[in-house]
Amino acid sequence: MKIKNLLLIILAVLFVSSTVFASGDKENGKKIYEKKCIWCHGKNGDGKGPAGSGAFLNPPPRDFTSGMYKFKTTPFDEILPNDEDIFKMIADGMPDSSMPAWKDILKEKDMWDLVEYIKTFAGLTGKPAKQIDFAKQVKTSKEGIERGKKLFLDRCAECHGEEGRGDATKKLKDDWDARTWPRNLTKSWSFRVNNNPKEIFARITAGIPGTLMPSFADPASKKKMTDEERWDVANYAASLADASKTIKEGSTVVKAKRILGNLPEKADDPKWQEAEPTNFYLVAQIIGKERFFTPSNNSIMARAFYNDKEIAILLEWDDRTKSIPGDEKAAEILLEGEVYNDAVAAQFPVTIPEEMEKPYFGMGDAARPVNMWSWKSEKKDAPQAVGLLNAMGFEKVEQRDANKAGLTAAGVYNKGTWRVVMKRSLKTGEKDKDIQFEEGKFIPIAFSVWDGTNSEKGSKHTMTTWYWIFLKPEAGAYVYAMPVVVALLVFGGCVLLARSSQRKE
Ligand code: HEC
Ligand code: HEC
């Protein structure tokens, strides 16, 4: 017994001294901070670096002078985060924000030194006295999920929406006066930390400091939940992840499926489940005249069917707000400006390129004109609208008659998701203006999306880079494998364009 105690003491001493040793070197931290972090977080740690103002980055970089860290694993009444919390955000980055992951760039010791240095901006010292107790973790079960769902509808849905898509129509700002949107819990890749139940339990136990997301462990709160209840709701929130919305790295092709008979015309036709979904990141449009840095939509899903005459493409994206120009309720959630229509567009080259070459990023150019199909949501007193145009770059745009070209589009909004079906015949009479679809070829395609409640209109919108749509012949050994060089080009482009695309498990 005694020897064991002695061993424990030695271990404890070793542990303490190693943590003392590991607690960083501020001077070195400062050096690295001034090389890597000031651009966003500012020399004084106030979040006002050259790229850091809220006009350029959404969400804006953290202001370290407040001493508040949003993602921490210490209790709500403990101001200090754990050093590990800060370290983790630096190492892993924060998905769906501009905060990069540094673990492949910086040495581990340098990251600990950074932790020590950024704490000095708010004069944070010492270790937190209290810790969240994870010991009573409740495993997920059918009954637990049922209980969690009830609690979720009662405690979380007012902000996160009934189905967790972050579509509750509330104006939420954080303590730095930046608009915050409750996380879309169905997109696990968009979590700043991650969506495993333990992390979600930490979020609802500690709250997210500086935001309106409260602690549900605070005895003074009417919404307080017991440990067990918080595990139930955390398990439920984790179960909302929708795997079909996962963006697979390197997945660049919308695979159109050949069917016999009529194509589904309605966006909510269950038949669409039989078409394989492909997801793409949406990034802000920053090439055209009016640059735009504060988008709200982050991804779009596409599926497609075709038969011997027509092609139908289903575009599906989560948009927190149904934007109806002229409608008073739709205007209630605006912070400023006015409500425009929600909209979506798909672009194709007019002529399918022979060498899998893609039109110039954006709206084509003189040598590679594009054909753009678009759809707009309804106004208070006008129905949804279909649009068609041809473009040779941003300046040379020709509006065309969608009806005459036989293009249709219809959309349905449901609990935070827009679904729009666009349909046209495979071939048209205007070969020099309309894309003529062919089986077995990689046809370039790109998407644009507008969120009218986020003041998106005209060239202010989100978009994807160019990808492919492939009409897969029914029988036959067509492979999707494309030349390696092309795949690299496409993939490289996406990496550059995607906002923070890192995914964490
Ligand atoms: C390109 C801009 C950018 C750069 C460069 C950057 N950050 Fe960030 N950082 C952000 C943004 C944006 C956030 C806030 C994200 C949010 O609120 O969801 C953030 C948040 C953080 C947080 C807050 C975590 C929390 O829980 O509140 C820490 C810590 C952090 N950054 C450290 C660093 C360090 C250290 C560096 C340099 C090695 C760095 N950042 C470089 C943009 C950046
Ligand atoms: C008053 C509004 C509000 C309520 C109620 C609320 N949340 Fe949130 N939640 C937010 C906001 C806002 C954010 C985004 C904060 C940010 O990143 O700035 C958020 C973020 C989150 C995150 C994101 C964590 C990450 O890693 O990105 C999770 C998980 C979450 N909430 C779960 C819940 C659960 C579960 C409940 C109910 C027990 C709940 N929230 C109740 C407003 C709310």
Image (cartoon, rainbow, N blue to C red):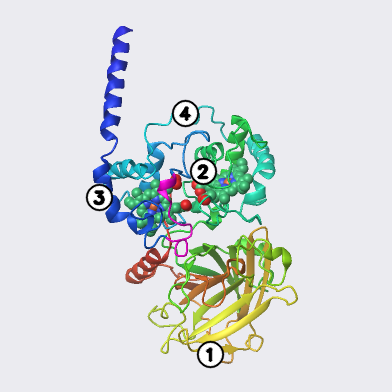
Tell me which amino acid carries mark 3.
Answer: Lys
| First of labels 3, 4 by sequence position | 3
- Does residue 472 appear in this view? no
Judge from the rendering whether residue 129 lies leftward or rightward of residue 140; answer left or right.
Answer: left
Q: Comparing marks 1 and 3, which lies closer to the viewer?
A: 3
Q: How far apart are the two marked residues, 1 and 3, measured between alpha carbons?
A: 57 Å
Q: Are marks 4 and 2 in contact (CB under 8 Å)?
A: no
- Which span of residues is magenta-colored? 53-66
Q: Are marks 3 and 2 in contact (CB under 8 Å)?
A: no
Q: Which mark is residue 209?
A: 2
Secondary structure state at the residue bearing disc 3:
helix
Q: Which mark is residue 463?
A: none
Q: Which residue is mark 1?
A: 433
Tell me which amino acid carries mark 2.
Answer: Pro
Tell me which amino acid carries mark 4.
Answer: Lys
Tell me residue 200's x, y (percent). Answer: 53, 41
Q: Are marks 1 and 2 in contact (CB under 8 Å)?
A: no
Please name the residue shown 55% across and 70% down the image. 449
Q: Which residue is mark 4?
A: 130
Note whether ligand 1 is within 8 Å of mark 2. yes
Q: How far apart are the two marked residues, 1 and 2, measured between alpha carbons?
A: 54 Å
Q: Which corner quadrant of the image does residue 124 belong to?
A: top left
Tell me which amino acid carries mark 1.
Answer: Lys
Q: How far apart are the two marked residues, 4 and 1, measured between alpha carbons?
A: 67 Å
Q: How far apart are the two marked residues, 4 and 2, measured between alpha carbons?
A: 16 Å
Examine the rendered structure and indicate whether residue 233 appears above or below residue 498.
above
Q: Which corner quadrant of the image does residue 474 belong to?
A: bottom right
Q: Residues within 10 Å of mark 2 (few under 14, many from 20)?
A: some
| First of labels 3, 2 by sequence position | 3
Q: Residues within 10 Å of mark 4 (few under 14, many from 20)?
A: some
Q: Comparing marks 4 and 1, which lies closer to the viewer?
A: 4
